[in-house]
Image (cartoon, grey):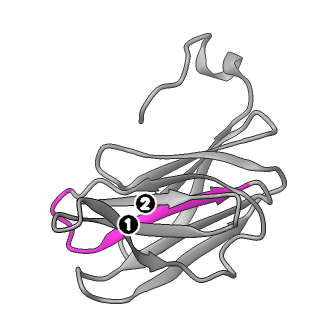
C-alpha cells in the first residue's frame, strides 16, 4: 500500500505501509524545486492498464506539477510544470486519467488533456458556476 501527501513544507512525499512495523515509512521525496509554497492537493492518476505512474500536485504559489514514474521501481521525474496566475487549490483526474482538472483561487477550473505523445495541453477553462448551467461540478 502506498500513499502520496503534500504539505506546508512545500514537499510531496510517497509513503509505503510496512507490515512488519505496522507503520507508514517515507519512501520518496520529490524534488524541492517543484513547489515554492504550501502543497494544497495531490492526486494519483487512476491506473487504467497504463504501466506508468503519474501524480499531480498543486500549491498555493500557483504551481501545478505532474510527476512521472515510467514503471514501478524506476525513478520519479518532473514531467510537466505549470505556473498559474492564481493559487492552485485542487487537482482531480478523470476516470481514465487522460484529463486533469485544476481548481484555482480565482474561481476557475482548468482542464489539461494528455496528448498521444505523452505531453499535456490546456483544453478549456470554466470561470463561474453559471458556466456549468447551475449544476455543481463533481468528479470528472
In this view of the protein, which residue sits in the foreground, 135 or 92? 92
Q: Give the mark, 2 or 1, whose residue is nearer the N terminus.
A: 2
Q: Nearer the viewer, mark 2 or mark 1?
A: 1
Q: Quadrant of residue 62?
A: bottom right
Please state, as top left, top right, bottom left or bottom right, where the N terminus lies in the image: bottom left
Please report the residue visible at 77 percent of the width from the left and 63 percent of the height from the top. Answer: 37
Q: Is 89 above or below relative to 62?
A: above
Q: Which residues are magenta?
A: 48-59
105 displayed left or right of 58: right
For numbered disc 2, what is the local secondary structure? strand
Please report the residue visible at 55 percent of the width from the left and 67 percent of the height from the top. Answer: 12
Mark linked to residue 4: 2
Please provide percent x and percent y for residue 52. Answer: 28, 74
Please report the residue visible at 32 percent of the width from the left and 70 percent of the height from the top. Answer: 53
Give yes or no for contact between labels 2 and 1 (Cβ–Cβ under 8 Å).
yes
Please provide percent x and percent y for residue 5. Answer: 50, 58
For numbered disc 1, what is the local secondary structure? strand
Mark linked to residue 15: 1
- The residue most toward the top is 134
Q: Count the marks.
A: 2
Gap between marks 2 and 1 measured at Cα: 6 Å
Amino acid at each position: 500500500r502506498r500513499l502520496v501527501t503534500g504539505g506546508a513544507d512545500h514537499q510531496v512525499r510517497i509513503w509505503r505501509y510496512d507490515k512488519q512495523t505496522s507503520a507508514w515509512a517515507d519512501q520518496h521525496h520529490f524534488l524541492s524545486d517543484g513547489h515554492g509554497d504550501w502543497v494544497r492537493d495531490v492526486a494519483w492518476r487512476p491506473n487504467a492498464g497504463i504501466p506508468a505512474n503519474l501524480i499531480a500536485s498543486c500549491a498555493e504559489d500557483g504551481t501545478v506539477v505532474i510527476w512521472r514514474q515510467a514503471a514501478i521501481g524506476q525513478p520519479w521525474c518532473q514531467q510537466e510544470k505549470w505556473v498559474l496566475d492564481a493559487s492552485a487549490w485542487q487537482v482531480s483526474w478523470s476516470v481514465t486519467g487522460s484529463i486533469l482538472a485544476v481548481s484555482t483561487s480565482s474561481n476557475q477550473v482548468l482542464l489539461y488533456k494528455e496528448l498521444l505523445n505523452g505531453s499535456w495541453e490546456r483544453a478549456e477553462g470554466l470561470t463561474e458556476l453559471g458556466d456549468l448551467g447551475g449544476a455543481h461540478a463533481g468528479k470528472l
